[in-house]
Amino acid sequence: MIVEAANRLNIKTVILDAENSPAKQITNSNEHVNGSFSNPLDIEKLAGKCDVLTIEIEHVDVPTLKNLQVKHPKLKIYPSPETIGLIQDKYIQKEHLIKNGIAVTKSVPVEQPSETSLLKVGNDFGFPFVLKSRTLAYDGRGNFVVKNKETISEALEALKNRPLYAEKWAPFTKELAVMIVRSVDGLVFSYPIVETIHKDNICDLCYAPARVPDSVQLKAKLLAENAIKSFPGCGIFGVEMFYLETGELLINEIAPRPHNSGHYTIDACVTSQFEAHLRSILDLPMPKNFTSFSTITTNAIMLNVLGDKQTKDKELETCKRALATPGSSVYLYGKESKPNRKVGHINIIASSMDECEQRLNYITGRTDIPIK
Ligand code: ATP
Ligand code: MG
Ligand code: MG
């Protein structure tokens, strides 16, 4: 989707990924590199072909990126390798946020995972708590909810051989998120605050704007902006937050890239998160309100399309219902359908959230009365 936005602006992109990966399917070039973002030699090959290097996954090798900066002094790398290093280990990210006065859930590193060390965490934090992999986590693959003493051994088995930390349970009433884009000069621009709803640890729905009072939206925006100001370099960031029963807001985690909770911006905002990222890393204009909703009555729901758990490609039936629904756009990524894999998303736009929900109910099959 970054490539799509780049194409419209005549910005040439060269991709490092597996052969025929989704990004390569939509931009023809003999320059693309077949390989992996975790292989230093492949990254070097890509860097030799670029003026600006960006990433859309934070699990890249930071020392390689830092070496590139020395080897190719003219090459710009955004997000900055330093920022990726502060974010890709979720416990280091927490320490960085705490150092900068940002509210986060209480955490401790688990250097020697054992029944005894986790029992101590349970005694300190209370049950349930969340055992998390510090690195390479996504879609909850890397998290284990330790409900009680009896589930400790299961947690140790599920996350064995991974670097771990433990997090206190956040009794949230809602999960909020916001996309923030930071310019080369360090200015931050926020998109609207949204509400994300997860199913099995995977984002299912995203409501824009979030259904919380304006005062909470403002507080969330300020918290997230302060967090992003603490990271060097520019680019777009996704900030996930917990809104607690007490009214308190805590940051869950930050992604230094376009984010699932920003997909709605393609249809709902003046500029999509993908174009905003390009404008930022290429130092292009970022005028007033370029991250706002397109109109004052815009409401949006984004629904992720996941590979059906039983029947391959069955999720396309949902997409077909979306095609038959007014105000709805389908995005499929050119990925092979696998159970629970994110293969696309649907944006639903209307002038009220009730209307968005009626459309969503038809698309998901909760009602069979088509929307006129
Ligand atoms: P992704 O990067 O895909 O957003 P992840 O694998 O990094 O996901 P987290 O964001 O840490 O995982 O957690 C996934 C979900 O699990 C959260 O969105 C939230 O619903 C729940 N969760 C995580 N940490 C806690 C916590 N401390 N208390 C309560 N729920 C939590
Ligand atoms: Mg994450
Ligand atoms: Mg997350």
Image (cartoon, rainbow, N blue to C red):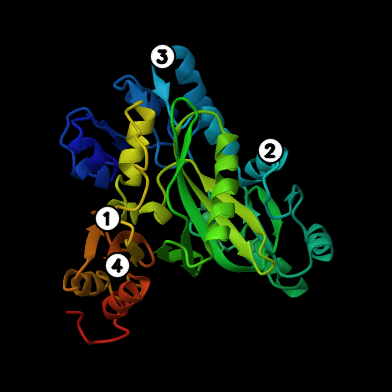
Upstream in sequence: badge 4 or badge 2: 2
Query: Does mark 2 have its CB less than 8 Å from ligand 2?
Result: no
Q: Mark 2 points at which residue?
A: 100
Vertical placement of residue 248 versus 88, above or below: below
Q: Mark 4 points at which residue?
A: 351
| Amino acid type at mark 4 | Ser
Q: Nearer the viewer, mark 3 or mark 2?
A: 2
Q: Residue 195, image x and y in percent?
A: 48, 63
Mark 4 vs mark 2, CA separation in Å: 39 Å
- Quarter of the picture containing the C terminus is bottom left
Mark 3 vs mark 4, CA separation in Å: 49 Å
Residue 88 visible, this angle: no
- Judge by depth and name the residue closer to the eye, 214 or 182: 214
Dot 1, how many residues are within 10 Å of its Cα: few (below 14), some (14-19), or many (20+)?
A: many
Q: What element carries label 4?
A: loop
Upstream in sequence: badge 3 or badge 2: 3
Q: Nearer the viewer, mark 4 or mark 2?
A: 4
The single residue placed furthest to the bottom in the displayed view is: 368
- Judge by depth and name the residue closer to the eye, 232 or 187: 187
* Residue 267: image tag: 1
Upstream in sequence: badge 3 or badge 1: 3
Dot 3, how many residues are within 10 Å of its Cα: few (below 14), some (14-19), or many (20+)?
A: few
Query: Contact, CB < 8 Å: mark 1 with mark 4?
Result: no
Q: Which of marks 3 and 4 is in front?
A: 4
* Residue 72: image tag: 3
